[in-house]
Image: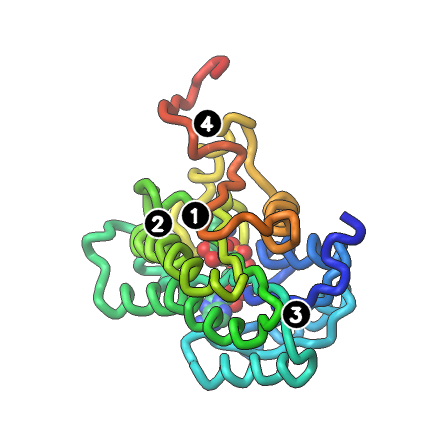
Amino acid sequence: TGQLMTGKRGLVMGVANNRSIAWGIAKACADAGAELAFTYQGDALKKRIEPLAAEVGSNLVMPCDVTDPASMDAAFAEIEKAWGSIDFLVHAVAYAPKEALTGRYVDTSLEQFTTAMAVSCHSLAAVSQRAEKLMTEGGSIITLTYYGAEKVIPHYNVMGVAKAALEASVRYLAVDLGRKNIRINAVSAGPIKTLAASGIGDFRYILKWNELNSPLKRGVTIEEVGKTSLYLLSDLGTGVTGEVHHVDAGYHVVGMKAEDAPDM
Ligand code: NAD
């Protein structure tokens, strides 16, 4: 992938540590020659992100909380000052209160619902509207979603509803931004052990179930999500927008699951 991203600059939102999906995507883009900026949420993460950014040759690292418009404005203003324009944006941000990610969806409170939707869904529109102004030569945006948007996954609850709304947002945003030659797609990743995933009840069981039932009989890695993201963010994907692309070892195509399926 040597030259694929040479001359392209992008913002990566959502690296919390080296197990973050956003980190897998950042590495793939950097390996392909991209220049990167990073945002993190909360001062505690600053120390963690700066060395990771340095690993891929970046010193453009800024705080950004997607629930705070002023914080988003400040981050994008800093990027504009440093670069003037950007070519791509990685949105790998989601949150729901832990109490909402266990038990029954029917018990979700309005406050839990609003928080999950604001951070995990509206934030995509919020950052896209700011990125649009900097994507003067067109651009590519990706977000991360999960199969829990399509089918019921135990404990995923309000996050599944937020991801369904996120996937619908990708389609609306694709039309809004398409006339400016800005593409936007979602990568639907299979379950991966990350900080965010550890908030979901029984996550290990979900992981195991995917390994047993996916066509490839295994899980996926952040490196694999990174490679597919690279295709969508680079000129390999210029004909693709509004899409939800699964990187899940094929799990979503299987109709009949069986824990002991001998040779299926
Ligand atoms: P992660 O914990 O590494 O990343 C989540 C990020 O969201 C963190 O960096 C966190 O700081 C950020 N964030 C939360 N609230 C924020 C706010 N208010 N403002 C700014 N940033 C905020 O976990 P991850 O699994 O890499 O998650 C990245 C994305 O991938 C999420 O959208 C998640 O839903 C999605 N995803 C994860 C899996 C999985 O199994 N891990 C599968 C499919 C999709």
Q: How many numbered marks are there?
A: 4
Q: Which of marks 3 and 1 is in front?
A: 1
Q: What amino acid is labelled 2 in the image? A: Tyr
Q: Find out whether the residues at labels 2 and 1 contact each other: C-beta distance under 8 Å.
A: yes
Instruction: Answer whether residue 116 is visible to the viewer in this image.
Output: yes
Classed neighbour count for the residue bearing mark 3: other residues with Cα under 10 Å, few (<14), some (14–19), many (≥20): many
Circle 3 — which element? helix
Q: Indicate which disc, 4 or 2, sits on the residue closer to the N terminus.
A: 2
Q: Find out whether the residues at labels 1 and 4 contact each other: C-beta distance under 8 Å.
A: no
Residue in the foreground of this view, choosing between 175 and 111: 175
Q: Indicate which disc, 2 or 1, sits on the residue closer to the N terminus.
A: 1
Classed neighbour count for the residue bearing mark 2: other residues with Cα under 10 Å, few (<14), some (14–19), many (≥20): many
Q: What amino acid is labelled 3 in the image? A: Ile
CA gap, disc 4 to disc 2? Answer: 19 Å
Q: Indicate which disc, 2 or 3, sits on the residue closer to the N terminus.
A: 3
Name the residue: 44% across, 62% down: 94
Q: Is residue 248 above or below residue 244?
A: above
Q: In which quarter of the image is residue 48?
A: bottom right
Question: Which residue position holds label 4?
Answer: 213
The spot of residue 7 in percent (x, y) is: 75, 64
Which of the labelled discs sits on residue 146, or is there none?
A: 1
Residue in the foreground of this view, choosing between 252 and 180: 180
Classed neighbour count for the residue bearing mark 1: other residues with Cα under 10 Å, few (<14), some (14–19), many (≥20): many
CA gap, disc 3 to disc 1? Answer: 25 Å
The spot of residue 163 in percent (x, y) is: 37, 54
Q: Find out whether the residues at labels 3 and 1 contact each other: C-beta distance under 8 Å.
A: no
- Is 175 positioned to the left or the right of 84 in the image? left
Circle 4 — which element? helix
